[in-house]
Image: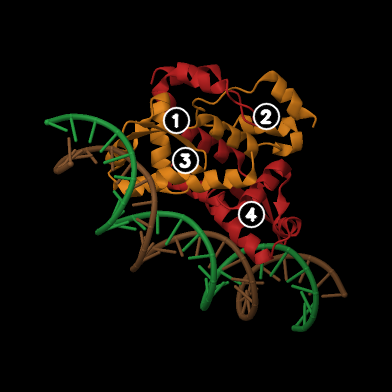
Chain colours: A red, B orange, C green, D brown
Amino acid sequence: MDKMVATQIFESLSSGIRLDIYRLLVKEGTGGIVSGQIAHILDLPANNVSFHLKAMTQAGLLTVVQEGRFQRYRANIPVMLDLIAYLTEECCSGNTDECASFREEVSGHLGCLPPLSAESQSKRSFP
Amino acid sequence: MDKMVATQIFESLSSGIRLDIYRLLVKEGTGGIVSGQIAHILDLPANNVSFHLKAMTQAGLLTVVQEGRFQRYRANIPVMLDLIAYLTEECCSGNTDECASFREEVSGHLGCLPPLSAESQSKRSFP
DNA sequence: ATAATAATACAACGATATTAGAACTATTGC
DNA sequence: GCAATAGTTCTAATATCGTTGTATTATTAT
């Protein structure tokens, strides 16, 4: 993951509207939602929503396909997972004991996030 | 996780400098780094770094403790985990089949992230 | 073809964030 | 006490972002 891409993604989520849009699309999953419906659900002017959708799509956070005169947007979950991996890439410089202590503090669930596979765990231990 | 807190965190990471600071602190883990050292490593004026550190700390992304005349900053990993949980809270409206397909697409490792526990998984399935 | 709909593109204003320089507070050591 | 160090705070200038209104493109239906 490139640093510029990462900052773009964070920018894409650093407003209440965009966060609402993203969570709406995450909830909808593979079904996606068309632009007008998003504007309607969030009660926002269409051009404003379009502006934000464009920014989020350019950042790679969303995907869009044309369906006739509709534009269907979907959350790009793998990109989010890559971003998370980027953030924690060198976590604790590979000291797994420290990581373990953090894991115990997690309060909520982690939604659709994948479990750590055994090989990726061992790979992290000794870089 | 409150929406306002979430947007503050994303704002806190939506610039290259802040992302650099955060990743530096994640790498350092529980040891943390003092303000001046961060400024030196990233080759930035101290007041600018202080400005960003303050914003990130107020967002809850960092913690800080005083050590004599030094201020030691640390990444607040549990907050990041909560944020991730917030993002994926209603992922796919609880349809675990869709989630499974996303999981297979993950390219990188996930650093210090905790594995999904069995109970949180089953709780997600039927909300 | 023409009108209606879905969505985006553009321009402009106001608000906000970032940066740098100077001044300020607090701690350490002589 | 005095100077040096670490860090923050304040102010002002600049840059950037978000919103709104209007215009434009593309698709569908009559």
Comparing labels 1 and 3, the label whose residue is closer to the camera: 3
- Residue B32 image position (x, y, % from top left): 38, 29
Q: Are marks 2 and 3 on the same chain?
A: yes
> Label 4's element?
helix
Q: Are marks 1 and 4 on the same chain?
A: yes
- Front one among C1 and B58: B58
Q: Give the position of the N terminus of chain B as an image quadrant.
A: top right
Q: Residue at x 71, y 59 (%)?
A: A39
Q: Residue at x 50, y 38 (%)?
A: B61
Name the kind of residue labelled 1 in the image. Glu
**Can residue B30 be seen from the camera position used here?**
yes
Name the kind of residue labelled 2 in the image. Ala
Q: Is residue C14 above or below residue A34?
A: below
Comparing labels 4 and 3, the label whose residue is closer to the camera: 3
**How would you rate the neighbour count of disc 1 (Cα within 10 Å): few for under 14, some for 14-19, many for 20 or more?**
many
Horizontal side, residue A95 vs residue B3: left or right = left
**How would you rate the neighbour count of disc 3 (Cα within 10 Å): few for under 14, some for 14-19, many for 20 or more?**
some
Q: What is the distance, in whole Å, between disc 1 and disc 3 at their CAs?
A: 21 Å
- Residue indicated by mark 4: A17
- Residue indicated by mark 2: B100
Indicate the quadrant where residue D7 lies: top left
Residue B39's mark?
A: none
Q: Chain ID for label 3?
A: B
Residue A89's mark?
A: 1
- Residue B119 image position (x, y, % from top left): 72, 20
Comparing labels 2 and 3, the label whose residue is closer to the camera: 3
> Label 1's element?
loop
